[in-house]
Image (cartoon, rainbow, N blue to C red):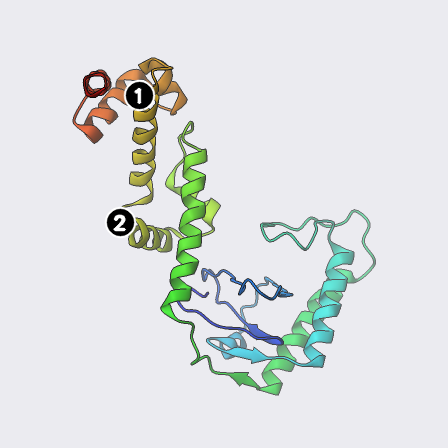
Amino acid sequence: MAEDKGYKLKQGEMIFHKPNEFHNLLANGKIAPNIIVITFVCNSEAMKYFENKLIVTGDTVKDLLTKIIKEALLAFSTPLNISETTKLDKKDKSIFGCEQLLKIYLQQLLIYLVRKGSNIVPNDRLSSLVRERSHNDTTKKIINYLKNNLPNNISFDNVCLYSKLGSTNLKAMFKEQMGMGVMEFYKTLKIDKSKEFIREEQFNFTEIAEKLGYASIHYFSRHFKKATGMSPSEYATSVKIRI
């Protein structure tokens, strides 16, 4: 996925994502793919060549990728097989020239691809069902994150950081999937959990407020009444009456 567009990559194909472009990967659940992801900065105008293209690779490209990985292993102590990595730490004692060779091989790779000029214009986009699946998976992860942080007071920026989505994409995707904003949904989860606590009668209102990260019982009561139309005590009474 690149933003809201889907591309189907086959063995030996490569895609370049634009700077700050949201992207994620999906496998078909049948064949385990081997994927190499490289992040780099290059301000050359020549990079426009790679926009909106799938690149067909060959043995030369595979050889250069192997060399890049080899030099990266020599240069950095951070494992390269962890997708959540955001920073690479240099080795205290790395082999002479490994970082320079890393850059040289990357430049060689880019120059080779431009000179070769072979590409597939991606007119074979994935269906909306695949896009929907991607958004569904991401939304489920975000909801689990919100549920696991009910005792805390996480912010929208925290959710952006966790989901690796920009604020605009996150707002649009979550609203499309759930019919409301992320923080509105988060507040709804807190209210639903507080109702559950009240029905179970294991904690008093002050304890419930603390367990759900409210600054005070007064703030919890105001939030509860705004969401339900009843104060916590009125809701507790209504539950007992129904029983």
Viewer-nearest residue: 157 or 98? 157
Where 7 falls versus 133 (above or below)? below
Label at residue 199: 1
Classify the position of the C terminus by image quarter.
top left
In the displayed structure image, the side of residue 107 where residue 183 appears, left or right: left
Q: Position of residue 54 (x, y in %)?
A: 52, 77
What SS does tag 1 mark?
helix
Viewer-nearest residue: 181 or 143? 143
Q: Position of residue 5 (x, y in %)?
A: 41, 69
Label at residue 143: none
Residue at image point 33% right, 34% down:
189
Residue at image point 48% right, 61% down:
23
In the displayed structure image, the side of residue 53 where residue 30 appears, left or right: right
Residue at image point 45% right, 66% down:
2
Place residue 46 in its image quadrant. Answer: bottom right
Q: Are marks 1 and 2 in contact (CB under 8 Å)?
A: no
What SS does tag 2 mark?
loop
Viewer-nearest residue: 177 or 111? 177
Does residue 94 appear anywhere in the picture?
yes
Q: Position of residue 94 (x, y in %)?
A: 81, 53
Does residue 104 appear anywhere in the picture?
no
Q: Dot 2: few (<14), some (14–19), or many (≥20) neighbours within 10 Å?
A: few
User: Residue at label 2?
Assistant: 179
In the displayed structure image, the side of residue 90 where residue 27 appears, left or right: left
Amino acid type, mark 2: Gly
Work out whether mark 1 precedes mark 2 in sequence or the reverse, and give the earlier one: 2
Q: Position of residue 120 (x, y in %)?
A: 51, 83
Amino acid type, mark 1: Arg
